[in-house]
Amino acid sequence: MAVDTGPAREDRRETLADLLIVDADVHVHESPGALAPYCDPPWDVALRTVADVPERYLDIPGFSPGGDGTLTARFPTAHEATRMVHSPEQMVAELSEIHVDLAVLFPDHLLKLPVLPQADYAAALARAYNAWLVDRWTSRHPALLGALVACPQDPDDAAREIARYADDPSIVAVYLPCAGVDPLWGHRRYDPIYDAAQAAGLPVLLHAVTVTSPVFPFNNHGFDTEFARHATSHTFSIIANVVSMISTGVVVRFPELRIGVTEAGISWMPFVCNRLDKEYLERRREVPFLTERPSHYVKRIYVATQPIEEPERLSDIATLMELYDGADTTIFASDWPHHDFDHPTKLNQVPLAADVRRKVFGENALALFGIDREGRRR
Amino acid sequence: MTKAVVGRVTDFPEGTHRVVRVGRREIGVFNIGGRLYGLPNLCPHQTGPLCEGRRVTGTLVADADSGWRPRWTMEGEVVVCPWHGLEYHVPTGRCLAYPEIQLRRYEVGVEGEDVVVSVAGQR
């Protein structure tokens, strides 16, 4: 007798709990006081000087100056947007609630590292953060993996940092801070960083935040509102840096370097692919080192989903991914615990084929970070 | 239709709200101007704990009547999801940013000294 047992097991949709979920972008809270013991003199004194400033979201004078939250009129709200994660235990518990199995840690305040004008101080902060990150976070739990911060004000020092941690099993990426960076990350002055990252087998990840600064493309003072600044700053910054890295040939000169971008959504990708291909047919001789269409290089970049677009037709997200051939390069990120974090349930509602869904939630990130399903470096 | 006692009247002073559990549901019960309202503690956007914010507030609107300048209104009637800030008007369950989102409203009443929430039977 034939019995209908429903769809075959492999056809059933896995739940978020069943899926391997790798989160390419979560944030630890590094306060000045926490970093001070790891910081070289005399800058440790500066950190202790601001250690007692009341915690404000990405806004501490002399540490993470000029928070955009300070520009806009404040009205009462229950969306206080000041979530912070202070310990590995807290991070693991909270990520478990959103079904994340492995996570790559980024800083809070040091998102604005490039804004600091004192290069020696910025480099000391980066060294202190990296030491603190490994000592207090990534060495404490196998699910917590680290992105070293590369100080753009001192590329040679950043390269030494990458070499120092090249064999640390808990470090899986080099973080290139974008907020206020000048010059853009395609400049040849950063070649030591790319050289070191490529030699270490570590990918570089671009990450921006919203700041208002005279530096392109953060000269966003033309906008009245955080609505406008925040909608554009992250994405403009990622577009600027990606176009910079392609137009100066980083992607050609460091062919083994894996590149990822975070916190810009995905909808800019088709735009950049198409505009660069268009320009290339007229101006190829300005970028003669490219041997393929520019979009081919863009499409090799890994793109984190957060903050995922919220179109009226959710299937538009799948369409956008198709437009940049993103099945193998799109990676999930939550941005936990920040105000605009994405719960995986949103991406999970997008109509993706089962294999693409598995890749986007976890498998693509394993390739980018060079790790196995337990987070061990391969 | 089933009813559940979720507390005493004195548990819900005017101008406050709290989340109660009825079976498997979490419901935010709000006392606005002496009238009780019930909304799901679940934001349809990304499943955030909609009613767990510390306070109910007003909000800003702007229209032709205000000369397109913002004015503070609906004081004490707007709940904001603590996860991503999506705003809802408690008395109507209307989402302010996306009008196509309309929250289910639970009937909340007083029987004697008890606050009673009505929910549909098991689905």
Image: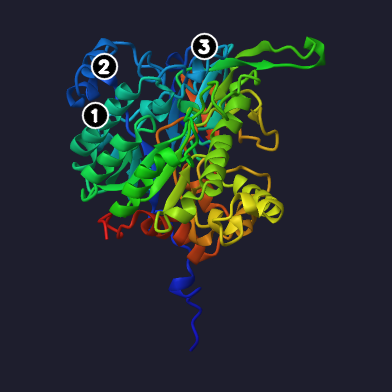
Looking at the rendered structure, the kind of residue marked 3 is: Glu
Left or right, B104 with reference to A346: right
Name the residue located 48 percent from the left edge and 63 percent from the top edge: A13
Q: Secondary structure at mark 2?
A: helix
Q: Are marks 2 and 1 on the same chain?
A: yes
Q: Nearer the viewer, residue A75 or A32?
A: A32
Say which of marks 2 and 3 sits in front: 2
Q: State the image coordinates of residue A120 (x, y, percent, origin top left).
A: 30, 23
Give the spatial CA distance, label 2 vs label 1. Answer: 11 Å
Quarter of the C terminus of chain A within the rendering: bottom left
Residues at badges 1 and 3 in contact (C-beta under 8 Å)? Answer: no
Residue highlighted by disc 1: A128
Amino acid type assigned to the residue bearing label 1 in the image: Ala
Left or right? Give the position of A88 relative to A231. left
Q: Are the residues tagged 2 and 1 within 8 Å (C-beta)?
A: yes
Image position of A254 with respect to B57: above or below: below
Disc 1 chain ID:
A
On what subunit does the disc labeled 2 rest?
A
Label 2 Cα neighbours within 10 Å, binned few <14 / some 14-19 / many ≥20: many
- Vertical order, B44 against A373 (above or below): above
Is label 1 in a helix, a strand or a loop?
Answer: helix
Circle on res. A47: 2
Q: Which residue is mark 3?
A: B14
Q: Nearer the viewer, residue A105 or A338?
A: A105
Q: Is residue B1 visible?
A: no
Q: Is residue A290 above or below residue A146?
A: below
